[in-house]
Amino acid sequence: MVCNKWELRFSMRKARDYREFLRYVVDNYSDKLVMIILEKLELLRKDPLKYAREKLGKDKHNNAMFSIEVTRDIRILYSLDSKNCIVLIWVIGSHKEVYGRD
């Protein structure tokens, strides 16, 4: 199935929907970074495979996982449900927070 537009969903500990996600990034990142993060989410909504930095295995639903670079150190970890055209956001944070290593 080809997806013309992907739906974003959030499965983060601190954000289960777009409103909570916005609140989280506004509280934790500078205004400049918030704008970059929102731009990256829009890129994911358009074509999540085009901007995938690397394939990272599978999520708990057996969907392929990827990351996208926000800045040199900040990443968004997400998975794709291609059948339903869903991008599931799992975590955003520093390289260490996302991958558990430097």
Image (cartoon, rainbow, N blue to C red):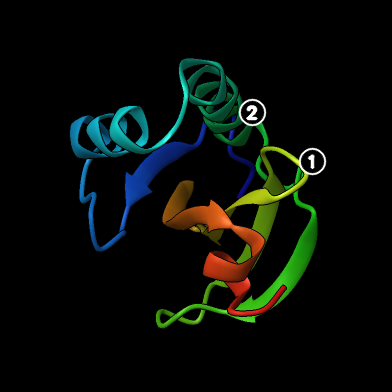
Where is mark 2, residue-wise?
A: 43
Q: Residue at position x 20%, y 51% from top?
A: 16
Q: How far across and how far down the image is residue 59, in percent?
A: 49, 78
Task: Please say if the residues under marks 2 and 1 sit with CB atoms less than 8 Å apart.
Answer: yes
Looking at the image, which is closer to me, 62 or 51? 51
- Which quarter of the rendering shows the C terminus? bottom right
Q: Residue 11's image quarter?
A: bottom left
Q: Please report the residue visible at 46 percent of the width from the left and 16 percent of the height from the top.
A: 31
Q: Residue tagged by mark 1?
A: 50
- Asked whether, in this view, residue 35 is left or right of residue 69, the answer is left
Q: Give SS at disc 2.
A: helix
Residue 34's place in the image compared with 76, above or below, is: above
Separation of residues labelled 2 and 1 (CA atoms): 9 Å
Which x, y percent locates residue 84? 43, 52
Residue 39 image position (x, y, % from top left): 59, 21
Eyeballing the image, is 41 above or below 35? Answer: below
Query: Which one is earlier in the sequence, the residue at label 2 or at label 1?
Result: 2
Which residue corresponds to the image point at 52% horizontal and 67% vertical from the top-left?
97
Pointer 2 local density, CA inside 10 Å: few below 14, some 14–19, many at least 20: some
The amino acid at mark 2 is Leu
The amino acid sitting under disc 1 is Lys
